[in-house]
Image: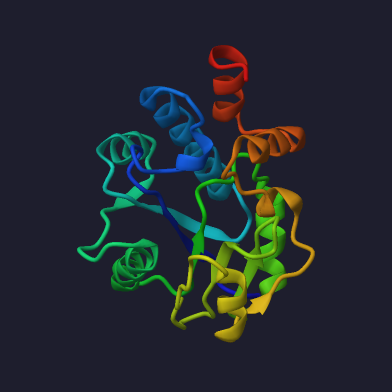
Amino acid sequence: MSPDVSLLVPIKPLHRAKSRLRDDRPAAEHADLVAAVAHDAVDAARNAPGVREVVVVTSDPRLAGSFAAEGVAVVPDGPAAGLNPALEHGERVLRGRGAGRVGALQADLPALRPAELGAALARAGEQRAFVPDHLGTGTTLLLAAPGGALDPRFGPGSAAAHAASGARELAGAGESLRRDVDTAEDLRRAAALGLGARTAAWLAAEHPR
């Protein structure tokens, strides 16, 4: 059995995150939605089999405070800008704490089911592996081999970049693990799978779009 994974979840500052999802929504409402989506993704990951811990990587003060209040460890972004440097910084922090296996999970997975994440971790075994997003071009989950480097290559075409770097594609991963949310249509499709409690409450109670 492969060792449990310490998952890094990077999140941009709320005022910059998920700009394509905003539409004409006021900035404060958009921030509430992004925060709800991120919390649902992290909550699901914390309950997934095979996950040792979840560590949020962000310098957003609101997110850092809300996650810390729930007992989630938070690592500030490193001095270098960008998603990959942030993940590399988080990985160094985890290695310093004795983490044996590290992974990266995207925060825009509001329908994520713990069982589907756990199944992907089990299928990966001890290999460096990744799960492509619903379009097949991006990456929602990247796993290092036990004791190996994460070597994140997120950005446009990250699925191909991770495959080229030697990571195994976990084809057939559960839909909730692949259904990342970048647009309003993505959110509607995620809702059809069943959203986490916070995102569902945001949509149903306050902003029924």
Q: In the figure, is residue 98 to the left or right of 107?
A: left
Residue 26 lies in quadrant: top left
Q: Residue at x 52, y 76 (%)?
A: 144
Q: In the figure, is residue 38 to the left or right of 48?
A: left
Q: In the figure, is residue 68 to the left or right of 37?
A: left
Residue at the limit of the structure toward the front, as seen here: 24
The N terminus, quarter of image: bottom right
Q: Residue at x 46, y 56 (%)?
A: 53
The location of residue 127, given as percent across then percent down, is 62, 81
Residue 94 lies in quadrant: bottom left
The location of residue 112, given as percent across then percent down, is 64, 45
The C terminus, quarter of image: top right
Q: Residue at x 29, y 36 (%)?
A: 65
171 up-or-down from 108: above or below: below
84 up-or-down from 204: above or below: below
The location of residue 42, given as percent across then percent down, is 50, 45
Q: Residue at x 54, y 27 (%)?
A: 198
Q: In the figure, is residue 65 to the left or right of 99?
A: left
The location of residue 5, given as percent across then percent down, is 52, 65
